[in-house]
Image (cartoon, helix red, strand yellow):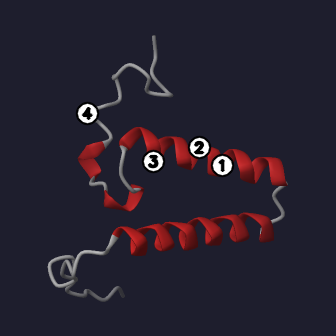
Amino acid sequence: MAALAVVRDLREYWAPASAEELERFETDVLSGFVLARASAGLEGGTIRGDVGHLEQIRTWFGRPLWDMERGCCGTRRAAPGWPGRRR
């Protein structure tokens, strides 16, 4: 039997993070990603490729990935320069 829990959005209660705090957080998250991939036995080239893809997506959207909402991706898919755009 599954239990239900009430969850509320905590973003309104937290103070906005500074640019330095966000940079440190991004570094920590990326480091954790690399360590997890390495501990799973993936080769260095595969990990570099995965990190490169994450950096391209972040650069293309111009903001951290965790800052995006569900609808952010669908509207720009057909935009020129989108990596997966069908021609």
Cα–Cα gap, marks 4 and 1: 24 Å
Q: Residue at x 72, y 64 (%)?
A: 37
Tag 4: amino acid: Thr
Q: Could you tell whether 3 is left or right of 86 in the image?
A: left
Cα–Cα gap, marks 1 and 3: 12 Å
Indicate whether 80 appears above or below 75.
above
Q: Label 4 belongs to which residue?
A: 75
Instruction: Provide the secondary structure element on which disc 2 rests.
Output: helix
Q: Residue at x 48, y 43 (%)?
A: 57
Cα–Cα gap, marks 4 and 3: 16 Å
- Answer few, some or many: residues within 10 Å of disc 4's Cα (few below 14, many 20 plus, some between 14 and 19): few
Q: Single out the mark in the foreground, 1 or 3.
A: 3
Q: Could you tell whether 18 is left or right of 34 in the image?
A: left
The C terminus - image quarter: top left
Viewer-closest of 4 and 56: 56
Tag 2: amino acid: His
Q: Label 2 belongs to which residue?
A: 53
Cα–Cα gap, marks 2 and 1: 5 Å
Q: Label 3 belongs to which residue?
A: 58
Indicate whether 1 appears above or below 79.
below
Q: Quadrant of residue 66?
A: bottom left
Cα–Cα gap, marks 4 and 2: 20 Å
Position in image of residue 77 (x %, y %): 35, 29
- Answer few, some or many: residues within 10 Å of disc 2's Cα (few below 14, many 20 plus, some between 14 and 19): few
- Whether label 2 touches label 1, CB < 8 Å: yes
Among numbered discs 1 and 3, the one appearing first in the sequence = 1
* Residue at the extreme top: 87
Instruction: Provide the secondary structure element on which disc 4 rests.
Output: loop
Q: Label 1 belongs to which residue?
A: 50
Position in image of residue 33 (x %, y %): 63, 66
